[in-house]
Image (cartoon, grey):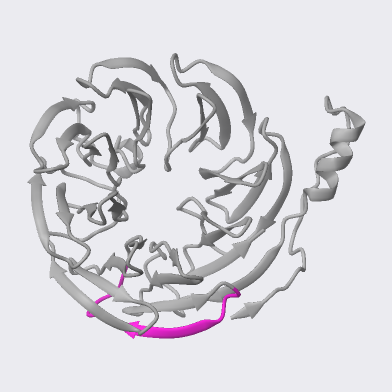
């Protein structure tokens, strides 16, 4: 582990010039705008030409748990010190979920699903899935969890790894190495499949309530032409917001799937809901605040010339990352405050922890940025 402490690796202060902020507000932002890498660690000692790091951490009981391409689960304390590692059957590229019991759930690239006890450093249970888990499991209020595999199958499991039910969606052709995860509300699961279908399923048995096809043409032959959902949807009231990478941001009725509005915005990560607004970071490098009812823009700020992921709310600031390894903090109106550059791409939104964000990079690094 690289101990960085409070050293600022790279900070971009953008508070001068013709600011529209008051002098007092500008001064307050200047004090808090520094962006520090508190600690950094190389999760799996990734070698040149290795596949990019794709796993995302979970936090539980003051522990950080993340799978690696070295076929191990790594457990860190909140200061970035590795406490233990646990062998899996294959590399892990999934997100992790910490259950209320303290068990952490994640999957390997062979489709094996694991329940891990990070304190004791042991595998509690395991289950074979129909395909690889590339997103992250989603917790339910009763302790169960849902997950979505790369072959568009939805599973519900108990905390002990017992399968309750599964639902099979239609498969697609060319795909990205990233899939959405379901969201749950009011006894329903809302799912976006890799072929562009959106479905509402009953949580108690997996029965289909409605399904809507959002992508009519799925015959792309290269990734640059591929329209595919990679971000989890969000629900605000009875409006379901679905993101299509290299496509559109679409609002649907959660009751029947009817389209309410659409914007030509490409997203790699899910929007954030705050005060009736949607905050999105786009593949064009912009951060926007949108009216959730109409999709109209309140403000739009250019942050980068590379694809963005996020945003994450950290205190009273937004945090986003980009495909060039930059992490930015923004004020509530999207104005850039500071930045730091990390080695590799940032393909997943930061994970919230202790007034900061855990950032995973394509070169295998895990960073606490604050």
- Give me the residue at 15% from left, 52% from top: 155
Q: Nearer the viewer, residue 12 or 34?
A: 34
- Give me the residue at 31% from left, 54% from top: 135
Q: Is residue 81 magenta?
A: yes
Residue 221 image offset from top left, x and y in percent: 23, 41
7 relative to 185 in the view: left or right: right
Residue 175 image offset from top left, x and y in percent: 24, 47
- Give me the residue at 55% from left, 43% from top: 306
**21 is higher (above) or lower (below) than 201:** above
314 relative to 346 in the view: left or right: right
Q: Can the viewer see residue 47 in this picture?
A: no
Q: Nearer the viewer, residue 27 or 219?
A: 27
- Give me the residue at 79% from left, 49% from top: 32
Quadrant holding the C terminus: bottom right
91 relative to 35 in the view: left or right: left
Q: Nearer the viewer, residue 235 or 174?
A: 235
| Residue segment shown in magenta | 79-92
**203 is higher (above) or lower (below) than 92:** above
């Amino acid at each position: 582990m690289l101990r960085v402490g409070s050293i600022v690796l790279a900070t971009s202060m953008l508070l001068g010039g013709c600011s529209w902020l008051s002098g007092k507000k500008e001064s307050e932002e200047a004090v808090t705008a520094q962006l520090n890498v508190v600690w950094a660690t190389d999760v799996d000692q990734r070698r040149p030409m290795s596949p990019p790091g794709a796993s995302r951490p979970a936090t539980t009981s003051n522990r950080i748990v993340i799978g690696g391409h070295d076929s191990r689960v790594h457990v860190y304390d909140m200061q970035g010190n590795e406490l233990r590692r646990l062998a899996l059957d294959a590399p892990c590229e999934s997100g992790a979920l910490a259950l209320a019991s303290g068990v952490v759930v994640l999957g390997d690239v062979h489709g094996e699903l694991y329940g891990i006890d990070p304190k004791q450093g042991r595998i509690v249970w395991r289950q074979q899935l129909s395909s690889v888990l590339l997103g992250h499991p989603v917790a339910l209020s009763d302790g169960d969890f849902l997950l979505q595999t790369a072959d568009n199958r939805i599973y519900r499991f108990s905390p002990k790894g017992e399968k309750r039910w599964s639902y099979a969606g239609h498969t697609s052709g060319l795909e990205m190495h990233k899939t959405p995860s379901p969201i749950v509300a009011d006894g329903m699961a809302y799912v976006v499949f890799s072929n562009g279908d959106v479905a509402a399923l009953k949580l108690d048995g997996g029965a289909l309530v409605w399904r809507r096809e959002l992508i009519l043409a799925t015959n792309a032959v290269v990734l640059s032409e591929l329209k595919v959902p990679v971000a989890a949807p969000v629900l605000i009231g009875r409006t379901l917001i679905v993101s299509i990478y290299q496509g559109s941001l679409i609002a649907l009725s959660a009751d029947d799937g009817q389209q309410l509005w659409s914007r030509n915005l490409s997203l790699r990560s899910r929007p954030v809901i705050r005060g009736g607004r949607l905050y999105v970071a786009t593949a064009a490098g912009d951060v926007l605040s949108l009216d959730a009812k109409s999709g109209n823009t309140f403000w739009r700020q250019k942050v980068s010339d590379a694809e963005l992921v996020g945003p994450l709310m950290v205190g009273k600031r937004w945090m986003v990352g980009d495909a060039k390894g930059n992490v930015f903090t923004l004020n509530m109106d999207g104005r850039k405050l500071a930045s730091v550059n990390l080695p590799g791409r940032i393909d997943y939104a930061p994970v919230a922890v202790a007034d900061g964000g855990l950032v995973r990079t394509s070169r295998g690094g895990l960073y606490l940025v604050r």
